[in-house]
Image: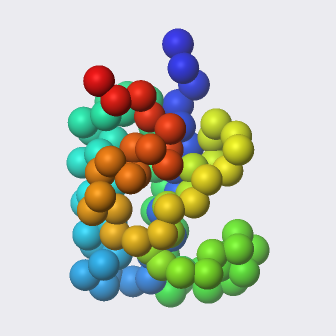
Amino acid sequence: MDSPRKLTLYVAGQTPKSLAAISNLERICAEHLPGKYIVEVVDLKKNPQLAREHSIVAIPTLVRELPIPLRKIIGDLSDTYKVLVNLQVEMD
C-alpha cells in the first residue's frame, strides 16, 4: 500500500482565495486520494514566521512534503488536473 501523501496548505486568514484553496483541496483529496492523504492547513496570519522558515513566497501555497521530493503549487487549486499532475497522482 502507498504511504499517505502529506500535504500542507499555507493560507493567510479567511480570504476568498484561501477558502477556495481549502475547499478545492478537500474535494480533490476526497475524489482522487480517498484515505491516502494527511492535510495540514497553516494560517500564516497566526504564524507569520513559518512563511520564511518554509520558503513560502505566495499564498495560498500547497506543499507536498511526502513522498519526497517536495513539490509546491501556488494558487487556489481550482485546476484539478494541474494539482493532480503536480502531486503526481495517477488518474484513472
Please name the residue shown 48% across and 78% down the image. Answer: 59
Q: Quadrant of residue 36?
A: top left
Query: Where residue 4 appears, x then y in whole percent?
Result: 53, 31
The foreground one among 39 and 80 is: 80
Instruction: Answer above or below: position of 56 versus 48.
Output: above
- Quadrant where the C terminus lies? top left
Query: Where residue 62 appears, x then y in whole percent?
Result: 50, 61
Please name the residue shown 38% across and 53% down the image. Answer: 82
Please name the residue shown 63% across and 75% down the image. Answer: 56
- 35 vs 71, left or right, is left
Colour scheme of the picture: rainbow
The answer to whether residue 73 is visible is: yes
Instruction: Answer above or below: position of 4 versus 81.
Output: above
Instruction: Answer above or below: position of 48 versus 32.
Output: below
The residue at the far right in this view is: 53
Count every numbered label the image shows and give the total. 0
Please name the residue shown 30% across and 84% down the image. Answer: 15
Query: Where residue 22 appears, x then y in whole percent?
Result: 32, 63
The foreground one among 39 and 2 is: 2
Q: Quadrant of residue 18?
A: bottom left
The foreground one among 23 and 13 is: 23
The answer to whether residue 38 is visible is: no
- 77 vs 42, left or right, is left
